[in-house]
């Protein structure tokens, strides 16, 4: 079964941004169900949140497709569904592995830009000192800042890009603005990644490919822009079969040198389908 969030206003309908996926899942033969996403995030009783989800008598598998959830909310959803007999494809540990950059960096490190991080508790108790310490590993190289899940890349110069990791004044300016914008939604702490010059269209758009994987099997590889070349996934595929997450995404891009890099890993349930993907075909592959 595929679980989707219900629409905020029409609780008996799927959230409108997932309407095409909902129809594609049904056309591929999946059972579907809805739940109260907003109620889950507000901490409401799980019986109310999941009242539209039927019980599973045979412990069938379930995949969540919907908006991003904080790890504690995902854990509540997992246990609520488990109590109804459903077995989510990604358990709480697998969700954190795919969703939090510090959890998965060591696993994919050979393909990822250099990455380091600090927890929220460390810099809230000690100011910028632990941040400056973490950044020493990058020397004077440029870096980008994000939390364990999201960046502010749409505010690139203001709250994402740091031209020189050793420039403490610039680090303080960008990081402070990032923390201000994230506010209460800051997840985990701060993640810093070495900035790499990536191939793009010359107008500021970087070429990226999003891949979905289920149990080590490649489901789809879709570019954000029409491209003839694509990443060679043979080596990555070997590693994917060992991944602690059953359902996940990997986003690829290409450096100026031609080397392919993994930009990010994501949980397969909360990662969006690229605009160029054939939704019906994607769900048919998922059903195989």
Image (cartoon, grey):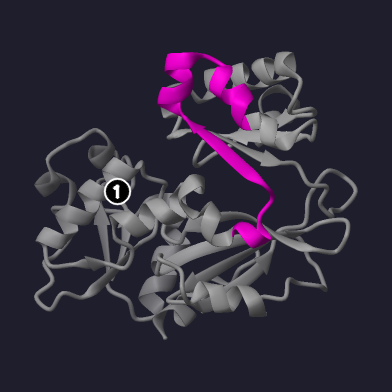
Locate residue 285, reporting x and y percent. 48, 81
Which residue was labeled with disc 1?
74
Question: Does 122 lie within the magenta span?
Answer: yes
The tally of labels here is 1
| Boundaries of the magenta span | 109-134
Residue 42 vs residue 237: left or right? left
Corner quadrant of residue 262: bottom right
Question: Does 265 lie within the magenta span?
Answer: no
Above or below, 81 against 156 in this view is below
Can see residue 215? yes
Residue 165 vs residue 122: left or right? right
Above or below, 20 against 42 in this view is below
Above or below, 153 against 257 in this view is above
Q: Residue at x 68, y 36 (%)?
A: 137
Q: Residue at x 88, y 56 (%)?
A: 256
Q: Residue at x 69, y 50 (%)?
A: 113
Label 1 environment density (alpha carbons within 10 Å; few <14, some 14–19, many ≥20):
some
Q: On the rendered image, what quadrant is the C terminus found in? A: bottom left
Locate residue 219, reporting x and y percent. 53, 76
Corner quadrant of residue 199: bottom right
Nearest the eye: 179 or 116: 116
Secondary structure mostly seen in the magenta stretch: helix
């Amino acid at each position: 079964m595929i679980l989707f969030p219900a629409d905020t206003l029409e609780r008996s309908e799927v959230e409108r941004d997932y309407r095409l996926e909902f129809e594609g899942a049904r056309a591929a033969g999946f059972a579907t169900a809805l739940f109260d996403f907003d109620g889950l995030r507000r901490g409401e009783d799980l019986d109310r949140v999941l009242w539209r989800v039927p019980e599973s008598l045979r412990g069938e598998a379930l995949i969540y497709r919907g908006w991003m959830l904080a790890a504690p909310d995902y854990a509540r959803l997992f246990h609520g569904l488990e109590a109804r007999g459903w077995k989510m494809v990604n358990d709480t540990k697998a969700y954190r592995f795919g969703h939090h950059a510090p959890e998965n960096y060591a696993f994919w490190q050979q393909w990822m830009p250099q990455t380091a991080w600090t927890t929220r508790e460390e810099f809230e108790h000690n100011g910028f000192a632990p941040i400056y310490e973490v950044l020493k590993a990058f020397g004077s190289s440029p870096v980008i800042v994000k939390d364990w899940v999201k960046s502010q890349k749409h505010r690139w110069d203001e709250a994402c890009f740091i031209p020189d990791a050793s420039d403490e004044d610039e680090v303080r300016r960008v990081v402070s603005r990032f923390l201000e914008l994230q506010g209460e939604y800051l997840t985990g702490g701060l993640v810093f990644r070495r900035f790499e010059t990536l191939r793009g269209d010359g107008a500021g758009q970087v070429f990226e490919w999003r891949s979905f994987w289920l149990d080590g099997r490649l489901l789809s590889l879709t570019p954000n822009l029409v491209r003839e070349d694509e990443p060679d996934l043979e080596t990555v595929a070997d590693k994917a079969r060992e991944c602690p997450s059953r359902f996940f995404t990997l986003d690829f891009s290409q450096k100026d040198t031609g080397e392919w890099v993994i930009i990010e890993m994501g949980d397969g349930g909360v990662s969006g389908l690229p605009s160029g993907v054939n939704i019906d075909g994607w769900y048919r592959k998922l059903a195989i």
